[in-house]
Image (spheres, coloured by chain):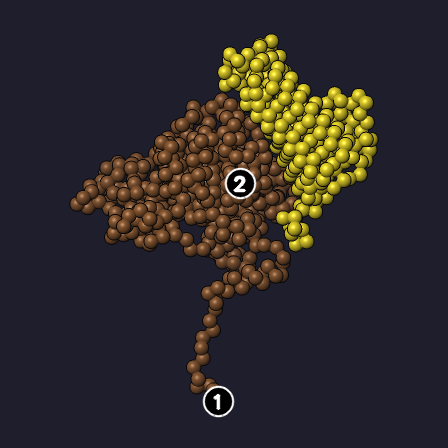
């Protein structure tokens, strides 16, 4: 149960120690104290461990995470879990812009709100935001699921590809080529599983969400779409 | 009345509405969509041909051309990286994606670069095993799209290049049309097969130099500060862009002029946005010098590098190395007259073929068609590239020795003069036969 105090230990040493862990390490639970908003905390971890960060983290916390479960008992800055490949990142507070940007896999759970560009260019990650998300979220999102229990800002899903977006609250506006789609039984089931995985299924009904996705009208160049280019 | 004896005035094309312009107007009217093509600027631009070296004479002492050493090696990434690159020659291979190029072409680039002791670079589509396997020094591009980006490949790379822009389309994102989004390309990019892929022009998780500094820190943390980190910009405002890249913590700045090629973008973008590499080098070097970082943060320049003279001139103006893309593809076999009947069938001719985005390349280089791609033997093509790199290096050494330099990096602006006022002003060297640098001396 290593406890790393970032008021004492340089972040570079912490990350190097985390990177040195093997898949069968016995040091499976790490606690990081006094993060004080430092950037790139626990970035690049590739081991089946749990890391708890007690406090607020800066930019790119848990960036490119693989396998690890990373819990932030606080808020996070820009790009939490950016390009995550697998594992789970749980933010107990709010997240700044570009949460889960370009992430390929794993699960990102944000208990609070997420700012603009949440899930931008996401490539397979599942993101569950218990609060609301800001504008331009899921911009050019390629794959995965974005679930929002609160509201979504302007230009949701602009130019998106195959990501599925589920919003329980209001949507201020849809971006280019993003449309509301029918919520079929398979979507309700997938959403039910995601909510359960995120630990927020109590009292939350999948039937209360609306589904948004790509109209696929911008997938190929066409003169009639010139205004969208 | 018989007018046959009256001399006829020859038909005269308008210089403004020339035949190419007229054909483009007709094409636009017929299709309603802009012209997309590959390559770099085709218009005539001030370039390295407008500079000449002043060989040694009475006032300067040359080196023996075949006996005295003229070194060519270069270190890249010495500022912060634990493992900087040490290349045998200062000519690198620019980023070109698997997707834009066939797997065989990427492998050939790796083979050729490795034989020559230099680096090659991935592109907007991730790292392939063929490329990594055949590349002694591989630079991994970190682009706005982040297609195929993953921490494992990041750690396999020898350097990381954060791409902010490229000379063919500064301010624009990548483009790969549906004909080239094959099953493998689609899987690597997490995209539906057959779509016209339009990459983002801005990075998704940072904006501006203050954020870039934090992004660079993250990449260093993930790779334990081992890898050199390059920042690549398209040439537009080189003084400020280079200064900000240095401020953000770059080890190396890559500066790409408008002659630099692209796999595909709008022709109007290629021809009308950005500046020639000749005009960009001196402001970039000035920024490094003003910050006390010249030779500490290395500068790689690209965009229209064709031969050893271009290499020598770029280095004399202050660059540490150059990168080649289009020329490397030609060395592999692109636009080879051997395929002329097939180029004719595509409505073009060898040397002018630039519809790389259509994936019908007879040379098997800019394609994902397995039958066409199989035409390129990566071993033989790699050998051709290595030969070409060797010739460029020998040519640059020939010039450097004539100027009395024992290392290519000892070339300097004082070794150069310009043939035109434009080149003199841009390169900040005197007009030949004078001591006049426009804007500096009278």
Crowd rating for badge 2 (residues with CA inside 10 Å; few <14, some 14–19, many 20+): many
**In the picture provided, is B247 more to the left or to the right than B413?**
right
Q: Are marks 1 and 2 on the same chain?
A: yes
> Marks 1/2: CA distance?
65 Å
The residue that mark 2 highlights is B97
Query: Chain B hue?
Result: brown
Identify which residue, B374 or B150, lies in the foreground: B150
Residue closest to the far top = A1
Query: Chain A hue?
Result: yellow
Residue occupying the point 69% across, 41% down: A175
Whether residues under marks 1 and 2 lie with C-beta atoms below 8 angstroms apart, the answer is no
Task: Give the mark count.
Answer: 2
The residue that mark 1 highlights is B2
Q: Where is residue B373 drawn, in percent x and y?
A: 54, 45
Crowd rating for badge 1 (residues with CA inside 10 Å; few <14, some 14–19, many 20+): few
Q: Where is residue B45 drawn, in percent x and y?
A: 41, 53
Instruction: Tell me the quarter of the image containing the N terminus of chain A.
Output: top right
N-terminal-most mark, 1 or 2: 1
Is residue A212 at all visible to an observer of this figure?
A: yes
User: Judging from the image, what secondary structure is the residue with disc 2 in?
Assistant: loop
Q: Where is residue B221 drawn, in percent x and y?
A: 51, 23
**In the picture provided, is B426 more to the left or to the right than B109?**
left
Q: Chain of mark 1?
A: B
Report which quarter residue A200 is drawn in: top right
Residue occupying the point 55% across, 57% down: B346
> Does B221 sit above or below residue B382?
above
Q: Nearer the viewer, mark 1 or mark 2?
A: 1
């Amino acid at each position: 149960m290593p406890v790393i105090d970032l008021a004492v230990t340089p972040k570079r040493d912490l990350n190097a120690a985390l990177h040195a862990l093997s898949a069968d390490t016995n040091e499976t639970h790490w606690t990081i104290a006094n993060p004080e908003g430092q950037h790139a905390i626990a970035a690049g971890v590739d081991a089946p461990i749990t890391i708890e960060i007690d406090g607020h983290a800066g930019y790119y916390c848990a960036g490119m995470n693989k396998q690890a479960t990373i819990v932030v008992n606080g808020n996070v800055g820009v790009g939490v879990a950016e390009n995550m490949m697998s594992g789970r990142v749980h933010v107990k507070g709010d997240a700044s812009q570009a949460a889960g940007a370009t992430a390929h896999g794993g699960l990102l759970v944000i208990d609070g709100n997420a700012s603009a560009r949440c899930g931008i260019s996401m490539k397979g990650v599942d993101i569950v935001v218990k609060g609301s998300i800001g504008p331009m979220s899921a911009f050019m999102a390629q794959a995965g699921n974005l679930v929002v229990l609160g509201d979504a800002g302007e230009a949701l899903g602009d130019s998106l590809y195959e990501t599925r977006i589920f919003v329980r609250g209001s949507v201020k506006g849809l971006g280019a080529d993003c449309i509301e789609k029918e919520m079929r039984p398979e979507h309700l089931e997938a959403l039910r599983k995601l909510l359960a995985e995120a630990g927020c299924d109590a009292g939350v009904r999948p039937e209360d969400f609306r589904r948004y996705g790509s109209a696929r009208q911008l997938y190929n160049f066409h003169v009639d779409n010139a205004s969208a280019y | 009345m018989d007018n046959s004896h009256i001399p006829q005035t020859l038909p005269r094309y308008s210089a403004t509405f020339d035949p190419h312009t007229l054909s483009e107007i007709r094409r636009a009217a017929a299709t309603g969509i802009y012209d997309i093509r590959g390559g770099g600027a085709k218009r005539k631009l001030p370039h390295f041909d407008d500079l000449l070296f002043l060989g040694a004479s009475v006032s300067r002492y040359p080196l023996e051309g075949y006996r005295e050493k003229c070194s060519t090696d270069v270190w890249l990434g010495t500022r912060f990286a634990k493992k900087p690159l040490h290349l045998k020659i200062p000519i690198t291979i620019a980023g070109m994606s698997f997707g834009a190029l066939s797997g065989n072409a990427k492998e050939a680039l790796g083979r050729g670069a490795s034989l020559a002791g230099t680096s090659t670079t991935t592109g907007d589509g991730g790292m392939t095993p063929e490329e990594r396997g055949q590349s002694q020094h591989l630079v991994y591009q970190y682009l706005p799209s982040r297609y195929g980006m993953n921490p494992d490949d990041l750690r396999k790379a020898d350097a990381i290049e954060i791409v902010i822009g490229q000379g063919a389309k500064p301010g624009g994102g990548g483009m790969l049309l549906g004909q080239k989004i094959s099953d493998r390309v689609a899987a690597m990019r997490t995209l539906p097969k057959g779509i016209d892929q339009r990459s983002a022009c801005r990075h998704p998780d940072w904006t501006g130099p203050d954020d870039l500094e934090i992004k660079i820190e993250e990449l260093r943390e993930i790779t334990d500060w081992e890898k050199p980190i390059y920042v690549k910009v398209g040439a537009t405002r080189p003084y400020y862009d280079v200064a900000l890249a240095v401020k953000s913590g770059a080890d190396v700045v890559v500066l790409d002029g408008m002659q630099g090629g692209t796999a595909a973008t709008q022709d109007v973008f290629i021809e009308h946005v950005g500046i020639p590499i000749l005009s960009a080098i001196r402001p970039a070097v000035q920024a490094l010098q003003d910050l006390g970082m010249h030779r500490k943060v290395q500068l790689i320049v690209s965009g229209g590098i064709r031969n050893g003279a271009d290499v020598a001139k770029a280095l004399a103006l202050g660059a540490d190395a150059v990168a080649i893309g289009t020329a490397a593809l030609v060395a592999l076999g692109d636009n080879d007259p051997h395929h002329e009947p097939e180029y004719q069938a595509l409505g073009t001719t060898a040397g002018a073929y630039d519809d790389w985005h259509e994936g019908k390349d007879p040379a098997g280089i800019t394609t994902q068609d397995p039958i066409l791609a199989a035409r390129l033997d990566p071993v033989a093509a790699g050998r051709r590239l290595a030969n070409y790199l060797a010739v460029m290096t020998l040519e640059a050494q020939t010039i450097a020795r004539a100027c009395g330099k024992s290392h290519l990096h000892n070339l300097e602006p004082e070794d150069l003069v310009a043939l035109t006022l434009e080149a003199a002003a841009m390169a900040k060297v005197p007009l030949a036969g004078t001591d006049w640098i426009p804007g500096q001396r009278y």
